[in-house]
Every structure is written in C-alpha cells, then in structure tokens.
Amino acid sequence: MNFRPCFISKNREVTLRATFNRAVDILQTLVIALGAGLTIWSAINLLEATATTIRAQIHRVYYSALDRLSIHSFFRMAYW
C-alpha cells in the first residue's frame, strides 16, 4: 500500500525527499571528512609521542654511558 498524506502534493513530496536525500549526502560527507581529520591528527600525535620516547631513550643511554665512564660527573661538577 502506497500511503501519501493528502495535504502534500506529489511534487512537494518529491522535493522534500530530494532535500532529505541531499541533507543525508552532506552529513555523510561531513562524517567522512571528520573521520579523516581525526585519523591524520591521531597519526601525528603517535609520531610525536614516538619521537619523544626515542629522544628520552637516547638521552638515558647517553648519560648512563657517561656515568659508567665517570665523565658525566666531572662535567656536572665543572658547571655547578
């Protein structure tokens, strides 16, 4: 059964349906763009965190090697 309210003409119903479909298309595009933006933002944050972790590891290895050589304590006393 094809129900159509009697107070809306057929042309008006087609226009409303087309408008609704267009609004859904726009919302789909916005959601896809938002997802892409969040993906890029997350990837950048992950790369920054990885770079920070690598810098901290290099710093820790470097200064632990200097402590083993007792050079680091000499420079620490010289600058204080």
Image (cartoon, rainbow, N blue to C red):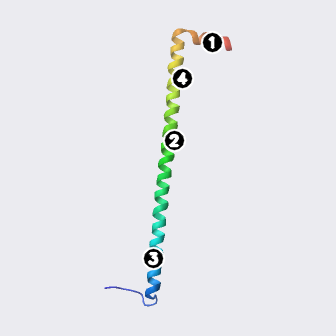
Q: Amino acid at mark 2?
A: Asn
Give SS at disc 4: helix
Q: Which comes sooner in the sequence, label 1 or label 2? A: 2
**Relative to 48, does residue 19 appear above or below in the rendering?**
below
Picture residue at 48% right of the left edge, 70% below the top: 23
**Relative to 61, does residue 47 appear above or below in the rendering?**
below
Q: CA distance from mark 4 to mark 1?
A: 16 Å
* Contact (Cβ within 8 Å) of mark 4 with mark 1: no
* Contact (Cβ within 8 Å) of mark 4 with mark 3: no
Q: Which comes sooner in the sequence, label 4 or label 3? A: 3
Kindly identify which numbered label has been placed on residue 18.
3
**Camera-side mark, 2 or 3:** 3
Q: Which comes sooner in the sequence, label 2 or label 3? A: 3
**Relative to 18, does residue 78 appear above or below in the rendering?**
above
Q: Amino acid at mark 4?
A: His
Give SS at disc 3: helix
Residue at numbered disc 1: 75
Q: Amino acid at mark 1?
A: Phe
Give the percent coordinates (x, y) of residue 15.
47, 80
Residue at numbered disc 2: 45
Q: CA distance from mark 3 to mark 1?
A: 75 Å
